[in-house]
Amino acid sequence: MVFPGGVGTAEEILYLLGILMHPENADIPFPMILTGPRESAAYFEQIDAFLRLALGDAAARRYQIIVDSPQAAARAVTRGIQQVREARIASQDAFFFNWGLRIEYPYQVPFAPTHANMAGLELRRDRPPHELAADLRRAFSGIVAGNVKEDGIRAIERHGPFEIDGDPEVMRALDRLLAAFVAQNRMKLPGAVAYQPCYRVVTR
């Protein structure tokens, strides 16, 4: 279950989606529920629109959005648990670990958000969706680092904003999503100093 946050939450959503969209994980039941209060509706609408554009409707089939209804969220969790239980009994899999889930090595190591690594991300829709999701997750990880992590902040001070480039339509959608996060104070805590982006999205 994922609750609304900001760019860090988007990073977590993409991380999980990248794993679930791997072809070898296609038939593994793994309920992914995005939920929150009524005030989170716009956040989830923006995330959903971005994911559908970048990764296609197949990505949206891997998650469910439930807003302003704890009861509906609880029912969805209960159904999901039952699906997982039945699948693991049928496959004689363990209940305590996701043994059948394919998690490739790049998902098991941290992403180093250097300027070179951020510029080298392959954000193109002609890639397999699970690979694109992985690099989009890395882009959000870099933005988180540039916003709040000491190494990332120092790198931005020395070299300027990270540059994010890729598929023009995806970049325009990413720019809109990040601009919404800025307007909603999801990049930093509200204060007297306006948020200065640690990134530059290349839009054509």
Image (tube, rainbow, N blue to C red):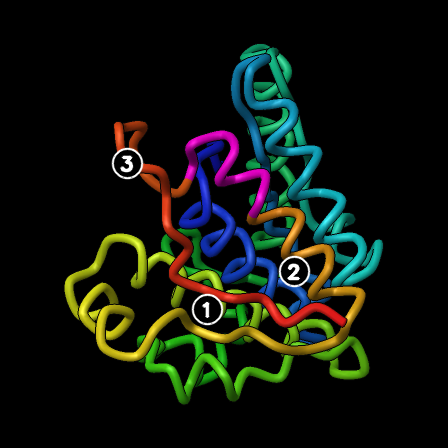
Residue nearest the observer in this picture, 36 or 101: 36
Kind of residue sitting beneath label 3: Val
Disc ID at residue 28: 2
Q: Position of residue 6 (x, y in %)?
A: 45, 41
Disc ID at residue 120: none
The mark lying in front, picked from 1 and 3, is 3
Q: Is residue 23 left or right of residue 140?
A: right
Q: Position of residue 63 (x, y in %)?
A: 67, 44
Instruction: Tell which circle, 1 or 2, labels the residue nearer the N-terminal end.
Output: 2
Per the image, label 2 sits on a secondary structure element best described as loop
Within-10-Å neighbours for mark 3: few <14, some 14–19, many 20+:
few
Q: Is residue 191 left or right of residue 6?
A: left
Name which quarter of the figure residue 185 lies in: top left
Q: Is residue 129 left or right of residue 196?
A: right
Q: Which residues are magenta?
A: 179-186
Per the image, label 3 sits on a secondary structure element best described as loop
Report the residue at 70% width, 50% height from top: 62
Q: Position of residue 159 (x, y in %)?
A: 30, 79
Report the residue at 80% width, 56% height from top: 53
Quarter of the figure with the C terminus: bottom right
Residue that numbered label 1 is attached to: 99
Within-10-Å neighbours for mark 2: few <14, some 14–19, many 20+:
some
Please give the count of numbered marks on the rendered protein.
3
Residue nearest the observer in this picture, 95 or 173: 173
Name which quarter of the figure residue 5 lies in: top left
How far apart, in angstroms, are the residues tagged by discs 1 and 2? Answer: 11 Å
Disc ID at residue 193: 3
Residue nearest the observer in this picture, 197 or 20: 197
Q: Is residue 103 left or right of residue 62?
A: left
Task: Tell whether label 2 touches label 3 (CB within 8 Å).
Answer: no
